[in-house]
Image: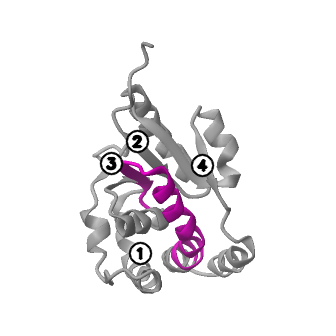
Amino acid sequence: AGASCPLMRVLISTRLGAGHIGPMIPFAHALLRDNAEVIVTAPASGAATIAAAGLDHHPIPDPPEDQRTPIFAKAATLAPDEANAFVAGDLFVRVDTRAAYPHMRAAIERWRPDVVLHDISDFAAGLAAEATGVPAVSVGIMLGSHMQRVVRPIAEALDEVRAEIGLDPDPTLERITATPCFTLIPPAL
């Protein structure tokens, strides 16, 4: 008695690391204050950070470290812009997105959120939302200018993954750029 029903169910999804999880926390807390039901889907190793924020964690497996380590090693030998492009396409998409996608899709199908709110670099969540027809909103965790420098390698890698999971190609990332985006980055930047 006295408890009100949630206004909506929001599945928040983010990638591995404090720089990805941290920016999602204020949005989760705001949604909870507004009486939304919220779960955070993130790699299992993010459990302590998510618990410390007082949020419910739906863990998915961590990305495969044996595939990530060689990519980071090669990236360390490249110039900064080239390294960022290489990591964005090969690690964020070809390794991490492929590993996370089936778990994200299963979480969406099982939990049935009204909306998926995801870290802009959590491509598995965006693809799973698109594949299941659930509305998505992204959270920009970096400057847009950084994202613009890695559009080509992301688009190429995502089109490989999109073909594997039965989604139409998106060579100019129209679907990503059409997704509403929140950010806490000050407009002056």
**Labels 2, 3: front one:** 2
**Quadrant that contains the N terminus:** top left
Amino acid type of the residue tagged 4 in the rendering: His
Q: Are marks 2 and 3 in contact (CB under 8 Å)?
A: no
Rendered location of residue 66, percent (x, y): 75, 76
| SS label for mark 1 | loop
Q: Which residue is mark 3?
A: 182
Q: Is residue 87 left or right of residue 179?
A: right
Asked if residue 163 is positioned above or below residue 107 in the image, the reply reads below
Query: In x, y percent, where is residue 34?
Result: 36, 28
Residue 58: mark: 4
Q: State the separation of the CA atoms marked 2 and 4.
A: 14 Å
- Left or right of 50? Residue 11 is left
Query: Going from the N terminus, do you reach mark 4 or mark 1 first?
Result: 4
The amino acid type found where label 3 is placed reads: Phe
- Report helix, strand or loop for mark 2: strand
